[in-house]
Image (cartoon, rainbow, N blue to C red):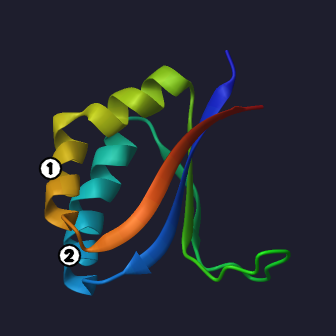
């Protein structure tokens, strides 16, 4: 079964306090769901579109595990804490 990678790109953050509240709840919820944080931060260098946006990459053992973690009550609580504090997108991608 291929691993899955949960990739989040932050387009903007309008409420840093809401983001901090989200991180306090969301990080442990993701780890409890089997996620392993691989990348968290700003790009060291950009090409093509040149977007300087925060990126988070989390590895899971499967797409099903990543989806179950996102849909879990603990992670949904984190999303409520974030509210509209950030504009971002999340993708779950299969990989090696």
Q: CA distance from mark 2 to mark 1?
A: 12 Å
Question: Could you say whether the residue bearing mark 1 is in a helix, strand or loop?
Answer: helix
- Tell me which residue sits at (75%, 81%) in the image: 50
Image side of residue 43 versus residue 60, left or right: right
Image side of residue 47 versus residue 39, left or right: right
- Tell me which residue sits at (26%, 76%) in the image: 20
In this rendering, the answer to whether 3 lies above or below 7 is above
Q: Residue 77: which disc?
A: 1
On-image quarter of the N terminus:
top right
- Disc 2 marks which residue? 18
- Within 10 Å of disc 1 (Cα), the crowding (few <14, some 14-19, many 20+) is some
Q: Residue 55: which disc?
A: none
Please tell me which of labels 2 and 1 falls first in the chain.
2
* Residue 22 occupies quadrant: bottom left
Hey, which residue is sitting farthest right in the picture?
A: 47
| Residue closer to the observer: 57 or 48 | 48
On-image quarter of the C terminus:
top right
């Amino acid at each position: 079964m291929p691993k899955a990678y949960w990739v989040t790109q932050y387009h903007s953050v309008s409420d840093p306090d809401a983001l901090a509240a989200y991180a306090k709840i969301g990080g442990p919820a993701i780890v409890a769901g089997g996620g392993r944080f691989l990348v968290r931060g700003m790009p060291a260098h950009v090409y093509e579109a040149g977007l300087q946006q925060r990126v988070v990459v989390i590895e899971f053992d499967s797409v099903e595990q990543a989806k179950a973690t996102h849909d879990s009550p603990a992670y949904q609580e984190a999303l409520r804490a974030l509210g509209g504090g950030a504009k971002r997108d999340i993708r779950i991608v299969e990989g090696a």
